[in-house]
Image: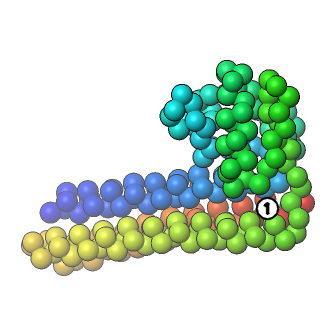
Amino acid sequence: MEEEIKMFLDEAKELMDKAVQHTLKELTKIRAGKASPSMLDGLKVEYYGVETPLVQVSTVNTPDARSIVIRPFEKKMISEIEKSIKNSDLGLTPQNDGETIRLNIPPLTEERRKALVKQVKNEIEAGKVSVRNIRKDTNGSLKDLQKEGASEDAVKRAEEKVQKLTDEFVGRLDELERKKEAELMTV
């Protein structure tokens, strides 16, 4: 029974870590006014009839803090990349010179910054909900173990460890939120 409890705790920690990593990945998509290739991570283009990530059909660079340059591996991909950017929710207008696509990143307005902070709070809250759901599922599994014969004390100790893990990972999410908010509100 002790090994099963340890297994549940290890699994909970791993799942909580994945929830935090996922939240971090989502936060990198929220731009803070400066250009970053990761802003285009979710962008897909049609490449020979298949939806393909932009990074697999081009190189993406940031020559300065206010622009992104996309250089397709094949020139005929320029129009597809341009169409994909226009249809995305990035709110950016691509400029095409025949060989590369340049995206100029406008500075953020105060209103836009506040909207992005709200988006950050929503992402963080989704991460916290994931962590709490993992806690709930793990505690449910521990209760089932107790019904199967695990000692009540062992299950109580395990539940306390799960709560400590939950507090630790929620703290990490809070820290991510503070950092991202500071990044967004810095002009």
Query: Residue 179 occupies which quadrant of the picture?
Result: bottom right
For the view shown, which residue lies furthest in the left direction?
149
Question: Horizontal placement of 151 versus 187: left or right?
Answer: left
Residue kind at label 1, given as amino acid type = Leu
Circle 1 crowding by C-alpha within 10 Å: few under 14, some 14–19, many from 20: many
Q: Residue at x 59, y 66 (%)?
A: 123
Along the line of sight, the residue nearer the viewer: 3 or 118: 118
Residue 134 x %, y %:
38, 67
Q: Residue at the top extreme?
A: 74
At horizontal 82% and vertical 25% (from top left) the residue drawn is 98
Quadrant in which the N terminus is drawn: bottom left
Can residue 126 be seen in this snapshot? yes
| Relative side of 168 to 141, left or right | right
Looking at the rendered structure, the secondary structure element under dot 1 is helix
As displayed, is residue 86 above or below residue 30?
A: above
- Residue 157 appears anywhere in the view: no
Front-lying residue, 81 or 147: 81
Q: Is 74 or 129 nearer to us in this picture?
A: 74
Number of numbered discs: 1
In the rendered image, residue 44, in percent from the top left (x then y), is placed at: 59, 41
101 shown above or below 94: above
The residue at the point 67 percent across, 28 percent down is: 77
Coloring basis for residues = rainbow
User: How far across and down, in percent of the image, does residue 154 sit?
Assistant: 22, 72
Looking at this view, is 90 or 75 the one in front? 75
Q: Which residue is mark 1?
A: 184
| Quadrant of the drawing holding the C terminus | bottom right
Q: Residue 67, image x and y in percent? A: 85, 40
